[in-house]
Structures are given as structure tokens and as C-alpha cells.
Amino acid sequence: MPFLGQDWRSPGQNWVKTEEGWKKRTAEDKNNNVSVESFCNKENLLLSLSYDVSAKKRKKDLMNNNDSKVPYFHREKWIYVHKGSTKERHGYCTLGEAFNRLDFSSAIKDTRRFNYVVRLLELIAKSQLPSLSGVAQKNYMNILERVVQKVLDDQQNVRPIKELLQTLYVSLCGLVQDMGKSVLVGNINTWVHRMENILQWHQQLDNIQINRPTSTGMTLTDLPSSLQLNIMQRLTDGRDLVSLGQVCPELGNLAEDRLLWKKLCQYHFTDRQIRKRLMVSEKGHLEWKKMYFKLSRCYPHREQYSDTLHLCTLCHILFWKDTNHPCPANNPESYTTSLSPQDFISLFNF
């Protein structure tokens, strides 16, 4: 079996320049030509090594400090995805490594990328959490804490974050109780403490009070009915329509519009799926609202994001949409493919 390491090749021979020309240096020459300068170089080398060891130790102590809120993951806007080992590069890029290196902490501050990151966190919580390294699992919790804090500050996207916390808590209960603590990296007490934090975050989101805006300008109820219905057609979640219809009786009547629910069903589901779940009222009309919620329980919704991660098939670089990556092609857009959150996870299934 060959030796596996960073470089299995020989370092080569040592040659010395003399008056007669270049001469190959032997082991005896190495022992005889020991000078004071070489001792000084060795001493400097040892000092540098001891400095590196102490610096790494201080960095490790900083990482292990639970009171420290300083994240220690990278903030790269693009990474190279390698799936095999070569003589120059050993190993391959994993999901945890990509999660650590990509700049997700800044992505949650961008409104266009927020839903994408939340969906990615949800998919990881469902099935991919044990495959992450210990550092990636800790970074996952740090990013989740930032997401919750952003929702508490902005008072927006409360429901999807509560669903994310519930999914993560159920997954952790199964991993800790049913499968055992060896599935997750770290002490079992650490994960119990993290589960307590999840319950605390969920309680904070339950107690959140939405402040009424202080502006005295025109509101949604002041608009004509045609504009109100046009705004409702931009909503892609039926639960948002139901919540909007509870604001006032006028919006409640518009939220029951059959054409509105029909377009919502046709947006998320195929014609074949709709034909399998037809529901007809006593008057002979299709119950599009009831069909929507019935279809939602049977089939996944259509996902659409303002900004996603992209993969260049030529140079195998993973990057955000508005970030330039070092591609040698004259037309990089022709080699770029958009990745959904599920595609991002499937990219690292070897």
C-alpha cells in the first residue's frame, strides 16, 4: 500500500557551489560544515515554532471559550469544490467545509438571500446535521442565533423561523435520545444546553409584539380593491393570505376570491397533481382554497428565491450570484447553473 501524505516524492539531493564547480554534498560534509550561523538559524527556527504553537494554543482557547461570541468561520464569497484526491490535493470538499467557508453570516443580512439560507438550515436540520463536523455544527448554531436575533429586531419572517426551530428541536431529540450521543460531536450536556436555547428562542418569537408603524400615510386598506387584489396575487403562501384576510372584513372578502386561490394552486402544483385532488362544492364549483391546503399536505411547494448560490461547471467554483469568481472562460454565464438549497446539499453526496 503506498504512503499517503502531502508529498510522497523525494526531496532531492543537496549540492554545494565550490571553486571547482558544483559538488554533491555528502553526509560527512554536513556533519563537518556545521557553523555558528547554522546554530543561529536552528535557534530562530525553534523560536518561531514555539511562537506558532503558543499562537495556535491561544487561538484554540479562544474557540473553546463558551462566553466568546466571536465566530471563527471564513467569510469567503466563493470556494472551489473538489470531489477527488490528487497528488497535489488530498481529500475532498465536504458539506461542513463549504458551510464553514461560505459567507452565510452576511447572507442572512441580505433580504434576497435570507429565505435561501433559512431553507438550507431547515434541510440540514432534517437530515444532514450528523454529517457536519464539530466546527460546522457550532457555526450552524451561531448562524441560527443571528437569524433569530434578526427576526426579533426586524419583526418579520416569524413563522418560518419558528418552524425551523421546531424542526431542529425534533431532530435533536431523536439524535440525542434514540440514536445516542455518539452521533453528534461534543459533550451531551452541550447539546442539551443548545436545545434549551432553541426552546428559549421559540418562546421569544411567541411573545414578540408587532409594533404598528408610526407613519400616517396611506395604508393597504386605503387602496382600491383592484390594487389590493393585485397585491394579494404577489403572495406565494396561502397562510399569508389567510392572515391578511383577518385584518378587516374588506380584505377578508378579497382573500376568499376563487381566482386568487386557483392561481396559487397552479403556481405551486402541476395539473396532474391538481386533478388527483379535485374538490367540488355543492354548487358545482371547484373549492380552490380547500384544494390548496390539501395539496400542500401531499406535495412540496414550488421554491423561488431572489438570489441563490451558483456553480460554475467549468472551474467547479461555488459562488453567490452577484459575486465575480475567477473563471477563465470568455462567457462565464454559459457555464453557470443555479443551485436550490436541496441541490447545494446533493452536491456533496459522494
Image (cartoon, rainbow, N blue to C red):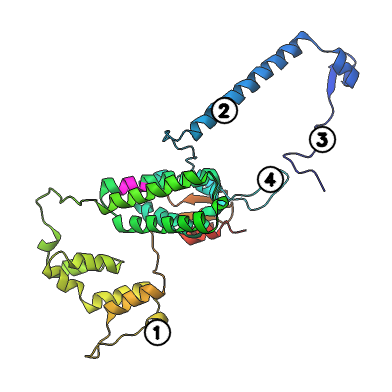
Report the residue that reaches farthest toward the top.
36
Compare residues 325 and 158 and report the one nearer the observer.
Answer: 158
Q: Earlier in the sequence, mark 3 or mark 2?
A: 3
Magenta-colored span: 147-151
- Residue 22 lies left or right of residue 225; in this view the side is right
**Callout 4: SS:** loop
Q: Which residue is mark 3?
A: 10
Q: Give yes or no for contact between labels 1 and 2 (Cβ–Cβ under 8 Å).
A: no
Inspect this view and state whether residue 120 appears.
yes
Compare residues 27 and 279 and report the one nearer the observer.
Answer: 279
Q: Is residue 131 above or below residue 35?
A: below
Of labels 1 and 2, the one closer to you: 2
Mark 2: few, some, or many residues within 10 Å (few <14, many ≥20)?
few
Inspect this view and state whether residue 331 appears.
no
**Callout 3: SS:** loop
Q: Label 3 sits on what residue type?
A: Ser
Q: Which residue is mark 4?
A: 90
> How far apart are the two marked residues, 4 and 2, measured between alpha carbons?
26 Å
